[in-house]
């Protein structure tokens, strides 16, 4: 039975930005290990460019 639901709308309980950065770095690294031919730093920056433009 659910007794409570906690929302962190302003990142005071959990630093979502840091989690997102770590997640993107891990995803890019995994794609490169799986055979994607790209520069890790460029891929990371490209993903965040899209994120900042599109949300």
Image (cartoon, grey):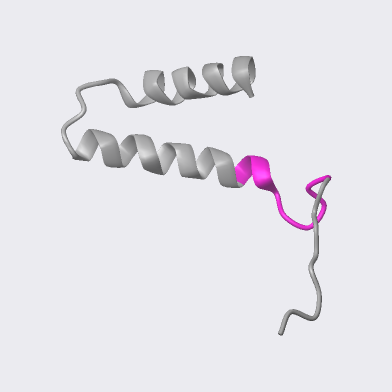
Quadrant of the rendering where the C terminus is positioned: top right
**Residue 50 is covered by the magenta coloring:** no
Give the residue displayed 72% in from the left and 55% down from the top.
14
Left or right, 31 with respect to 53, comes to: left
User: Which SS type dominates the magenta stretch?
Assistant: loop
Find residue 46 and report its horizontal and vertical position in percent. 45, 17
Find residue 43 and report its horizontal and vertical position in percent. 38, 22
Does 38 appear above or below 9? Answer: above
Left or right, 43 with respect to 3, comes to: left
Does 48 appear above or below 24? Answer: above
Give the residue displayed 62% in from the left and 43% down from the top.
18
Find residue 15 and report its horizontal and vertical position in percent. 70, 49
Give the residue displayed 82% in from the left and 47% down from the top.
9
Does 50 appear above or below 25? Answer: above
What range is drawn magenta here?
10-18
Find residue 3 and report its horizontal and vertical position in percent. 80, 81
Give 52 or 29, whichever is nearer the viewer.
52
Give the residue displayed 21% in from the left and 28% down from the top.
36
């Amino acid at each position: 039975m659910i007794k409570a639901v906690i929302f962190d709308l302003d990142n005071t309980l959990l630093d979502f930005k840091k989690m997102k950065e770590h997640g993107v770095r891990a995803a890019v690294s995994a794609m490169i290990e799986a055979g994607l031919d790209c520069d890790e730093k460029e891929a990371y920056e490209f993903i965040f460019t899209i994120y900042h433009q599109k949300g």
